[in-house]
Amino acid sequence: MLYFSRGSKDDRITPDEVRRILKETFDKMGPRKRVLAIPPDFTRFNSYAGQITEMVNDYFGDRLTDVMPALGTHAPMTPEQVKTMFGRVPAGKFRVHDWRNDVVTVGEVPSEYVHKVSEGRLDYVWPAQVNKLLLDPSFDLILSIGQVVPHEVIGMANYTKNLFVGVGGSEGINKSHFIGATYGMERIMGRASSPVRDVMEYARQHFIKDLPIVFILTVMAKNPATDAMDVKGLFIGDDFECFQKAADLSLETNFIMVEKEIKKCVVYLDPEEFKSTWLGNKAVYRTRMALADNAELIVLAPALKEFGEDKTIDGLIRKYGYKGTPHTLKCTAENKDLQDNLGASAHLIHGSSEGRFTITYCPGPLVTREEIEGVGFKYGDLAEMTKRYPPESLKDGWNTMPDGEEIYYISNPALGLWAYPDRFKD
């Protein structure tokens, strides 16, 4: 059922309107005794999910008993991040998702189905895993909250990904990421339907259809006049129709089609949001379809401190590096540590340029040249690069430097997907 649908590229839904829409929607749903909210974590700070969770708390009060940020494999939020993102929501309501230990397998997607949607690339069973808290029968409403935006693993972020990955389990996350990586990232990004989405939609329809889940989905875009994030769309429902409408608007709003291939791209990673290449490689994922052959991608990463946010994943990235699909698949076939962590294998594929363009990472003082070069990237001096390409002086899009050099600048790679028409084929 679609409870509410509004949005367009030119729309701007104000906070007061969002609050009114939520109240009217919840009123129509009828009384609820115990509510669980599943918003994204701090890595999706710009999703407006924090403000919506505050409004949910204001409406339900003590009936909103639990808030579980959809961490996936990310590090738990700090108390400061919780306060910054969720404001008035009491700290005592927050629960930490443990993707390795606190999950239940609610069903298995057959290997025959995985083989079909992956076009024969894989034929394993996919376990549909969620945090055990979702199965508590005392919840009569589970609100999955978040932003729909182009995504490298599944095509478009959120909806069932918020459940089966955000509060999912190790095996399910690893295997879903590997499906996307072997199918081909550039065939997936920006598309509502993909093999990974198909597998998760199968799981939703077969294994969790009786859970009282309602999705609250936003579509966001930066306002060039104020530099703030505007709510362009708000969609509330309990099935694929809700997600499809949000995905259609996101494709129109968040997909940036460049008029010519980019030869030099400079991407800035906000220190509050990006501290690992696991997240920071959105600079690679989201730009690759816009980059020319032999292009140079420069990533300004002042807060970089690690590669993976999980110690095991961090170690695997350091061991095997971002060295292309053939190398990663060979290492996966030959090494049990990668076989047990297919999400890491997928990430290594996603983060490689496949030799088509260069990737220069410019970290702050917490990561050395040897570490950057050890995983297969080129190293750039942050002070030197920020002096040449000062983020505070650049505008998103094309810039001509004082010496005449032309670059394309992106202030936050998480907010969109960039492509050149010849590289993006329906």
Image (cartoon, helix red, strand yellow):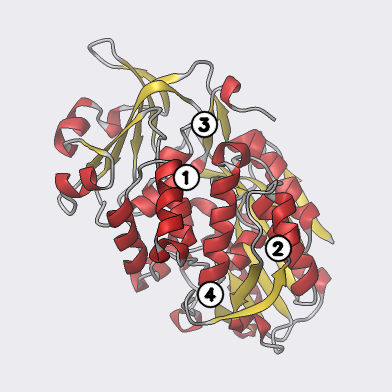
Give the mark, 2 or 3, whose residue is nearer the N terminus. Answer: 2
Image-based side of 396 in relation to 188, left or right: left
Image quarter of the C terminus: top right
**Could you tell me how many numbered marks the image carries?**
4
Residue named by callout 3: 418
Please name the amino acid that badge 1 sits on: Ala
C-alpha separation, residue under disc 2 versus residue under disc 4 = 31 Å
Residue tagged 2? 111
Q: Please tell me which residue lies in front, 335 or 324.
A: 335
Label 1, on which residue? 414
The image quarter containing residue 354 is: top left
Residue at image location 20% in from the left, 25% down from the top: 388
Real-space Cα distance between discs 1 and 4? 22 Å
Residue 183 vs residue 96: left or right? right
Local SS, label 4: loop
Q: CA distance from mark 4 to mark 3?
A: 31 Å
